Image (cartoon, helix red, strand yellow):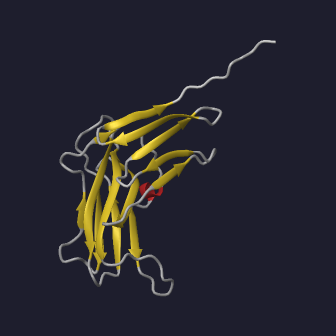
Amino acid sequence: MRIIAFIFFLIAPMLVFAQDPENDSFAPPPGEYIASAWIKDNVSAQTTDYSGFIRISTVPPSSSGPVVIAQAEEASIIDGWVRVIGRFTIPEGVTSFSLELVPSATGSYFDDVRVLPFNGSMKSFVYDPLTQRLMAELDENNYATFYEYDNEGGLIRVKKETERGVYTVQETRSSSSKTSN
């Protein structure tokens, strides 16, 4: 049960991060980084071999060439999605880097794409655009905790995504007693 929060990646699959001296825009300093994402290939039957991947290139080019972040040999597949995670280095003298989401031959969906320093941590939150309720919280390992609500807005279920699948960790039932006059 993934929530596709980064729809724009399906339209513009390459992001370029560069230093703009006039605007002092975002550019990561040299060092070790982690890139991760969830990928689902556009196939009718669930597969265990995903061919979508992330490619990271630098300008000027790194002596080792682009870094490819793909499915690990023993990656867990959760509801048809596989988490890819990898480490890469931005060397001294790099003026920009690009992160390219490369789909499989049948097409791929990419979700929860992250780039962060190797020794950093990140949490993300997904809110329902109509009700403003918290729908999901993504932890430091890019696994989600999903929140489900009843029609009155009360929390009824909390599910946690793990390497072994999605599990219900809390479920609440409530009712109002009806009195007859």
Q: Find residue 135 and report its horizontal and vertical position in percent.
A: 52, 44
Q: How many numbered dots are placed on residues in this image? A: 0
Q: Is residue 130 above or below residue 124?
A: above
Q: Find residue 143 and report its horizontal and vertical position in percent.
A: 37, 48
- Quarter of the rendering containing residue 92: bottom left
Q: Find residue 120 and report its horizontal and vertical position in percent.
A: 36, 65
Q: Quadrant of the N terminus?
A: top left
Q: Is residue 6 visible?
A: no
- Quarter of the rendering containing residue 94: bottom left
**83 or 169: nearer the viewer:** 169
The residue under the point 47% across, 79% down is 25
- Extreme bottom residue here? 22
**75 or 40: nearer the viewer:** 75
- Quarter of the rendering containing residue 48: top left
Q: Is residue 75 above or below residue 178?
A: below
Q: Is residue 77 above or below residue 120?
A: above
Q: Find residue 174 and report its horizontal and vertical position in percent.
A: 59, 25
The residue under the point 48% across, 46% down is 136
Q: Is residue 69 visible?
A: yes
The residue under the point 39% across, 57% down is 113
**31 or 60: nearer the viewer:** 31
**115 or 57: nearer the viewer:** 115
Q: Quadrant of the C terminus?
A: top right
The residue under the point 40% across, 67% down is 15
- Extreme top residue here? 180
Q: Is residue 33 above or below residue 151?
A: below
